[in-house]
Image: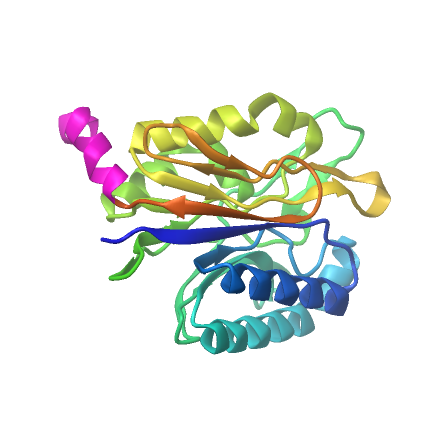
Amino acid sequence: MPRFLLGLIQLNSSFDLDSNLNKCEKFIEEAAAQGAKLIGLPENFPFLGSEKEKLERSREIGSKTKSLLSSISKKLNVSILAGGFPTPSGNGKVYNTSILYGADGEEKFEYHKIHLFDTDPGDGVEYRESRSVESGQNIPEVYKSPELGNVSSVICYDLRFPELFRELVNKGADMIFVPSAFTKITGQAHWEILLRARAIENQCFIFAPAQTGTHLNGRETYGHSLVINPWGEILADAKEGEKLLISEIDPEEIQNVRKKIPALKHRKL
């Protein structure tokens, strides 16, 4: 399988849906102009505001987001991972939803975040994602693309649950997105370590587009969108600030690493 260019978009999203989507569109166009064939957006990319407004506007957010990404992926002939946005769950809450759009503009899979961020990490903000978000019940699908490889996605807090990644590898995934809005305090402590661990133990590529900077009510996200190869090496780091990160991906690295250390074949459990 030939090499290709990956684009990860690092954002500082706000409560302004139209402004966020316009920004995403410009970054996607820039990535496509540079030759990227697979482009990833972070969690909360179209909207990062209050829980109340998220619930009230979930249909509008979901509709506008899906319409834009379906249209632009087809127009630019690129695949786009929509990293995480609210869609109605039907019970008064929303799902935190990730969708992969193919270069034909069609949905290749839709995933609802399983593990919800109900924590008090120590930054002065109480996080209770389950107040407004319904937990997904299904393991993410794997899109087996002839041009790109076997692509799947988790969302943010899912990163801390290695059994989910192993399930994806069992289903054939060799490139896993981790779109995130990691808090600054947990990002400084755990972001790189966990992402590299997931890449090493599953011998797969990890693509992690992230939110960055200060948001509503003083919430801070870590940034440092990363591209990590199956050997656990960091191929690219966006550090801080809004930007586009371009990285060359060589799918042959997957089998090369799995041949060097056939750990996946040695599993006993």
Q: Is residue 187 magenta?
A: no
Give the image quarter of residue 223.
Answer: top right
Relative placement, left or right, of 145 versus 81 is left
Q: Is residue 266 magenta?
A: yes
Q: Residue at x 60, y 44 (%)?
A: 210
Q: Position of residue 193 (x, y in %)?
A: 49, 24
Identity of the residue furthest to the top in this view: 189
Residue 93 seen in the figure: yes
Q: Nearer the viewer, residue 245 or 157?
A: 245
Q: Position of residue 162 (x, y in %)?
A: 39, 32
Q: Main secondary structure of the magenta part?
A: helix
Q: Position of residue 76 (x, y in %)?
A: 48, 73
Relative placement, left or right, of 240 versus 136 is right
Magenta stretch bounds: 252-269
Q: Nearer the viewer, residue 68 or 59?
A: 68
Q: Residue at x 62, y 29 (%)?
A: 187
